[in-house]
Amino acid sequence: MFDHKQASDDTYLDEILAGADSASVVFKSKRMDARGGKAYVDRVLQIKLRDQNIIDVGRTLGRRWTQRWRAGETTTAHQAVSEVSDLLQDQDLIDDGEQARYETAAISVRSTSEATTTITADTLKDAFTYPVSDIKPDPYTHYSEVSSRLAKIADQEGVEIQEIDPHEVARCLTGSTPAHS
């Protein structure tokens, strides 16, 4: 029997935010075209985040939205806009009431490696897509990397796991084929 619950990697989110070269909050509003067939973005407000603001805003919202997501709850676009603007108001980065003109909010974080991560309430899980290389690692290296990250997440979530020896994993996976694995 398995007891399942959604987990997140708070350490990885912190790594993304701490490694940010730049970040901004982007608010958008949409309108329907004259025919009423397609929505288009008619207004965009971009607020640059600097230094500690990147970590404060990103971490607070990321953790809040992740907790809801793990609990099976959703954060509406309106709720996200409100939460983002409240944090920005606390830091004097947006005027009170300005958020009423927008339907969506996102935090765009750009790292020094030129990678961009977008954090929104409804696509937060995309922030936990780990970077991969072009070269397939050997099973020992792959398992070592995955198991160390998994141990951190399990500890954070209070889940007990038993590690497997990476050499045993490599022996099991080396030479296996989909038909025989």
Image (cartoon, grey):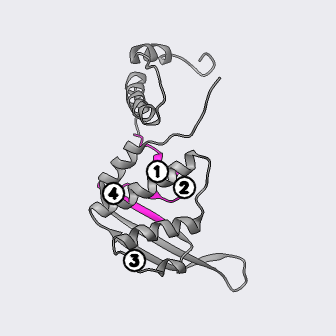
Q: Is residue 5 above or below residue 92?
A: above
- Pinpoint residue 19: horizontal percent, then vertical percent: 30, 52
- Position of the C terminus, as image quadrant, is top right
Q: Who comes first in sequence, dot 3 or dot 2?
A: 3
For mark 3, what is the residue?
A: 94
Which residue, as the protein is rendered here, is positioned at the far left? 51
Residue at position x 45%, y 58% in the image: 61
Q: Circle 3 sits in a helix, a strand or a loop, which is it?
A: loop
Q: Are marks 1 and 4 in contact (CB under 8 Å)?
A: no
Q: Who comes first in sequence, dot 4 or dot 2?
A: 4
Picture quadrant where residue 59 is located: bottom left
Residue at position x 46%, y 19% in the image: 162
Residue 148 vs residue 83, the one in the foreground: 83
Residue at position x 53%, y 81% in the image: 101
Q: How many marks?
A: 4
For mark 1, what is the residue?
A: 127
Q: What amino acid is at disc 4?
A: Ile
Q: What amino acid is at disc 1?
A: Ala
Q: Residues within 10 Å of mark 2 (few under 14, many from 20)?
A: few
Q: Residues within 10 Å of mark 4 (few under 14, many from 20)?
A: many
Residue 83 on the magenta segment? no
- Pinpoint residue 3: horizontal percent, then vertical percent: 61, 29
Q: Circle 4 sits in a helix, a strand or a loop, which is it?
A: helix
Q: Residues within 10 Å of mark 1 (few under 14, many from 20)?
A: some
Labelled disc at residue 22:
none
Mark 1 and mark 3: span between their CA atoms?
25 Å
Q: Is residue 43 above or below residue 163?
A: below
Mark 3 and mark 2: span between their CA atoms?
24 Å
Residue 113 visible: no
Magenta residues span: 106-133
For mark 4, what is the residue?
A: 55
